[in-house]
């Protein structure tokens, strides 16, 4: 069974680090401590990783081609979750928020 490439694993690791550190997309989330809101029941955190991994693109060599875009879309969801008046632009497409698996 193929494994995720080192580049994909590094992207996921860095995303998790920035998320836990409170430093994802500092421009968009500068004054928002989103961490408590994501840890309440688990589902918000699940959606953050769902969006990040659904948006993440990998080329034929297993190299991530859009890490910044994937982080930005996840940050937009976090911002909207913490501040419902924030309008996500462009709006999320169903494939971006589709939960995969059990």
Image (cartoon, helix red, strand yellow):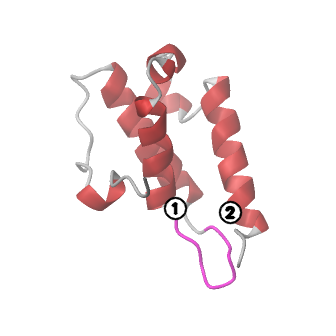
Quadrant of residue 62 in the image? bottom right
Label disc, if present, on residue 8 of the rendered structure = 2
Distance from the alpha carbon under mark 1 to that under mark 2: 9 Å
Magenta part of the protein: which range?
Answer: 57-64
Q: Is residue 57 above or below residue 45?
A: below
Q: Residues within 10 Å of mark 1 (few under 14, many from 20)?
A: many
Where is residue 15 shown, x and y percent of the image? 63, 43
Specify whether 81 is left or right of 102: left
Q: Do residues under tags 1 and 2 come within 8 Å of each other at their CB atoms? A: yes
Where is residue 65 shown, x and y percent of the image? 59, 69
Q: Is residue 26 magenta?
A: no
Specify whether 74 is left or right of 68: left
What residue is shown with label 1? 56
Instruction: Residue at 67% x, 25% y: name it.
Output: 21
Specify whether 5 is left or right of 23: right
Q: Residues within 10 Å of mark 2 (few under 14, many from 20)?
A: many
Label 2: which secondary element: helix
């Amino acid at each position: 069974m193929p494994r995720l490439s080192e580049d994909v694993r590094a992207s996921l690791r860095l995303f998790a680090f920035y998320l836990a550190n409170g430093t994802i997309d500092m421009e968009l989330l500068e004054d928002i401590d989103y961490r408590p809101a994501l840890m309440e029941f688990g589902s918000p955190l699940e959606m953050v990783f769902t969006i990040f991994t659904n948006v993440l693109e990998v080329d034929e060599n297993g190299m991530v081609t859009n890490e910044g875009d994937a982080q930005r879309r996840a940050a937009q969801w976090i911002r909207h979750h913490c501040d419902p008046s924030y309008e996500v632009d462009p709006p999320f497409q169903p494939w971006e928020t589709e939960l995969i698996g059990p």
